[in-house]
Image (spheres, rainbow, N blue to C red):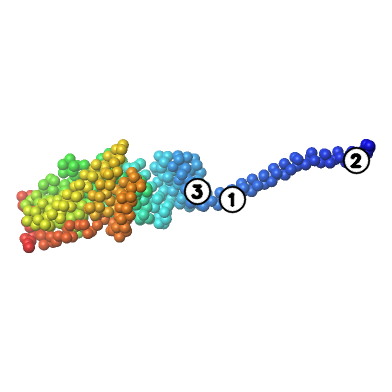
Amino acid sequence: MNESTSPEQTAGRSAKSSTKRVGVPTRILRVCVALGIAAALVWGAFWVYEQFRPSQQIFQLGQRAIMLEDYPAADKYARRLIRRDPDSKQGFLLKGLLASRRNRPEEALEWFRKVPDDRSPEAGDARSNGGIVLMYDLHQPSQALSEAQRGYDQNPFNPSANNLIPDILRLGTRTWELVPYEVWIAKFGMPYGYVSPRRLYDLSLGHSLHTNVELLQKCAEAAPDDPIVRLGLADVAMNEKRYDEAEEHYRHVIASHPEILEAKVRLGQALAGGNSAAKFYQWNAGLPKEADAHPLTWAIRGKWADEHGEPKVAIRCFWEAVRLDPNHLPAVDRLGQLLTAEKRTDDAKKFLDRARLLNLYMQATQELNVLTEKPDILKPWAAANRASELGLMSEAYAWVGLTQQLDPEQQQVLDAAKQIQKLLEKAPPTRALPAVNPAAEVDLSKYPRPNWPADAPAEVKPAAASEPSQK
């Protein structure tokens, strides 16, 4: 039996149905509102984080943008740092790096110089990068050296400063001064890409290294009277036996920059090459005391004495040179020959053996100076062993590192790296360990030092001060 439906019941059902239909979009709306609020909160949190993001992270983002050549982004990060702090060292440094990459050297220098010398990491980086701009963009080597040395003073462990300073010194053949920096590079420069076969080969040449003529020409055009340029030009003249021209360059540097000892020492080479006895003796008499701490001074004296009939004086001079630098191949080798002539065979052997090893090491480094399509792991490993035999532990460590690049898993190489690291922990910043110097084993101090007159006429030969007592 069907019950009749009243109008009130029909209206109630219609109202419930209507309520259900309206409820679906209301829930969606509520969800959307909730998501919007969540998004706003997330964005707000992100905005707050961005506002208070550590400056170091912003700086690193800027560096990465420069590496990726995204210069607008790098500029944005730099401006943001400076907006946050008008004296932001990281902002100034980033601006300088960006200007340098955009080939705007003068602008780069302005930004780098805004960073104060406060011994902060940024100060060291700013000075070093300023030196790079001055050296390779503006070709002002002495200004570049001054800037790089300031960077080193801010942080002696700054990789760029330790890399740049010897590069500049090398241009002026100031090879004795660059040794401590090259030792640092050999020890710590591998992660920064500063260690290379060419660099180690140049180091092995010691005082025989010649200037980089191509770079020298660029610097000579921009700064013809720069003392480092003059020293490089003197080296070119010496190599071509234009001794008068070399003398002129050296004397110019001595007059304008008397603090550069290398010019005073190498002047003796030019005078000896020109075979002017009077000038040579005047040079010797006029050398400052600190010149006696330069091995090349004694090597030049020894060569002159050797060529002018004073073998005993030559022995003393070469011995003094080797005491200071046991890697000076001409002095080591000639001293061994002179001792052989003196019938001191056992003593001579110590020097001749080292000369032989130095020759073999230089040959090994020369072979590795040219990269090949198929690098041979045995070659840098052989150079590492030669360096180790000579007590050149920092160089041995560098060669081991280059070997590891070719075969990172070779156990023999890994063990060698650990052993050398231990030795280097207490080693002085010299190329060779003191214990391997043959001059420390053989005492030749009783041989006469030079006793040359200050103003000898050209025809007068030098005379030995006294005869050595022989045993």
Tag 1: residue type? Answer: Val
Q: Residues within 10 Å of mark 3 (few under 14, many from 20)?
A: many
Q: Earlier in the sequence, mark 2 or mark 3?
A: 2
Tag 3: residue type? Answer: Ile
Mark 2 vs mark 3, CA separation in Å: 70 Å
Q: Earlier in the sequence, mark 3 or mark 1?
A: 1
Q: Which residue is mark 2?
A: 9
Mark 2 vs mark 1, CA separation in Å: 58 Å
Residue nearest the observer in this picture, 227 or 72:
72
Q: Residue 339 at what x, y percent from top left?
A: 10, 55
Which residue sits at x=42%, y=52%?
122
Q: Quarter of the image containing the N terminus?
A: top right
Q: Secondary structure at mark 2?
A: helix
Mark 3 vs mark 1, CA separation in Å: 14 Å
Q: Residue 169 at what x, y percent from top left?
A: 28, 48
Which residue sits at x=88%, y=41%?
12
Residue nearest the observer in this picture, 263 or 190:
190
Q: Which residue is mark 1?
A: 48
Q: Which residue is mark 3?
A: 58
Answer with left or right where residue 48 lies relative to residue 271. Answer: right
Q: Secondary structure at mark 1?
A: helix
Q: Is residue 445 above or below residue 360?
A: below
Say whether marks 3 and 1 touch (CB < 8 Å).
no
Answer with left or right where residue 251 lies relative to residue 218. Answer: left
Residue 202 visible in this rendered orientation of the protein: no
